[in-house]
Image (cartoon, rainbow, N blue to C red):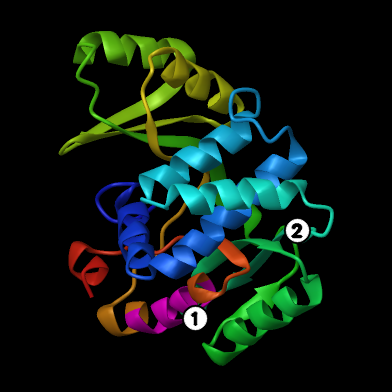
């Protein structure tokens, strides 16, 4: 959500999480379990579960792990996860929004608060940061071979796509939060597999930092992302290409 492209931070974050594959699989499995528990444990009728499984496959999560996460939702003794969010500021005025899925709210809030405190930030009340972000539907797919680029763009625009970015062999489609289901259905109809998708929070304003300030704030963001209860971390740093490579 920063740098020359809105998706630069997504790419950076995905690379960082791929390096911590066990942690990534834990987060993906948790989302699969929650999705399966909220609806039927069947990807043909449960859109959220279908997307969660597609995200897991896109991250090369083993099939056994995926099936185990779905079965976990059906067990009477399975964890009862709840979804919660936290808002705060890192050092140098960086806005940070944290999405969590947890089976122990007290543990999660204590951990999140401790990270903010340790790394020069502060946890804020609900609504303090939310207004600085807008929620968008974001889908990343491999560049389709079975349909022309022009036809594909027309199909996506018809479904509500606001922006289509092509980079290397991948296409990223963004739309309003309200058109999430329409985009997902259109991709399903076109038989295009989602590599990564979901609702994302994109910053409305960006903060420029020098390298030292960037490194300082990233210690907090990395610590939050390392926590197994934390699913996603959003911020409004306008990171440079060199900073994203740090």
Q: For mark 1, give the secondary structure.
A: helix
Asked if one can make out residue 207 in the rendered structure from this viewpoint, the answer is yes
In the image: residue 35, left or right of residue 171 = right
Q: CA distance from mark 1 to mark 2?
A: 31 Å
Which residue ends up furthest to the bottom in the rendered image?
A: 118
Q: Which numbered disc covers residue 117? A: none
Percent x, y for residue 21?
Answer: 39, 66
In the image: residue 213, left or right of residue 188 = left
**Residue at 68 percent of width and 36 percent of height:** 41
Q: Residues within 10 Å of mark 1 (few under 14, many from 20)?
A: some
Q: Main secondary structure of the magenta part?
A: helix
Q: Which of the two labelled residues, at mark 1 and mark 2, occupies the earlier sequence position?
A: 2
| Magenta-colored stretch includes residue 222 | yes
Which circle, 1 or 2, is nearer the viewer?
2
Q: Is residue 161 above or below residue 57?
A: above
Percent x, y for residue 43?
Answer: 59, 30
In the image: residue 163, left or right of residue 235 = left
What range is drawn magenta here? 215-224
In the image: residue 142, left or right of residue 192 = left
Q: Quadrant of residue 117?
A: bottom right
Percent x, y for residue 140?
Answer: 36, 36
Q: Which residue is mark 1?
A: 91
Q: Quadrant of residue 158?
A: top left
Q: Which numbered disc covers residue 81? A: 2
Percent x, y for residue 234?
Answer: 50, 59
**Residue at 22 percent of width and 14 percent of height:** 146
Closer to the camera, 115 or 127?
A: 115
Which residue ends up furthest to the right in the rendered image?
A: 76
Position of the C terminus by quadrant? bottom left
């Amino acid at each position: 959500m920063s740098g020359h492209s809105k998706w630069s931070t997504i790419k950076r974050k995905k690379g960082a999480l791929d390096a911590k594959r066990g942690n990534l699989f834990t987060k993906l499995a948790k989302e699969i379990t929650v999705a399966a528990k909220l609806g039927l444990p069947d990807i043909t009728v449960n859109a959220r579960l279908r997307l969660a499984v597609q995200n897991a496959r896109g991250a090369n999560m083993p099939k056994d792990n995926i099936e185990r996460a779905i079965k976990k939702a059906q067990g009477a003794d399975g964890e009862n996860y709840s979804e919660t969010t936290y808002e705060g500021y890192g050092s140098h005025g960086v806005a940070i929004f944290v999405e969590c899925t947890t089976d122990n709210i007290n543990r999660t809030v204590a951990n999140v608060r401790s990270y903010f405190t340790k790394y020069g930030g502060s946890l804020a009340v609900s609504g303090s940061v939310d207004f600085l972000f807008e929620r968008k539907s974001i889908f990343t797919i491999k560049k389709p071979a079975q349909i022309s680029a022009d036809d594909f763009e027309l199909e996506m625009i018809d479904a509500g796509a606001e922006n289509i970015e092509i980079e290397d062999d991948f296409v990223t489609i963004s739309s309003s939060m309200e058109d999430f289901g329409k985009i997902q259905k259109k991709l399903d109809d076109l038989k295009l597999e989602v590599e990564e998708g979901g609702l994302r929070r994109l910053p409305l304003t960006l903060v420029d930092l020098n390298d030292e300030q960037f490194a300082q704030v990233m210690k907090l963001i990395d610590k939050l992302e390392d926590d197994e209860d934390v699913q996603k971390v959003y911020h409004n740093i306008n990171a440079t290409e060199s900073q994203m490579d740090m």
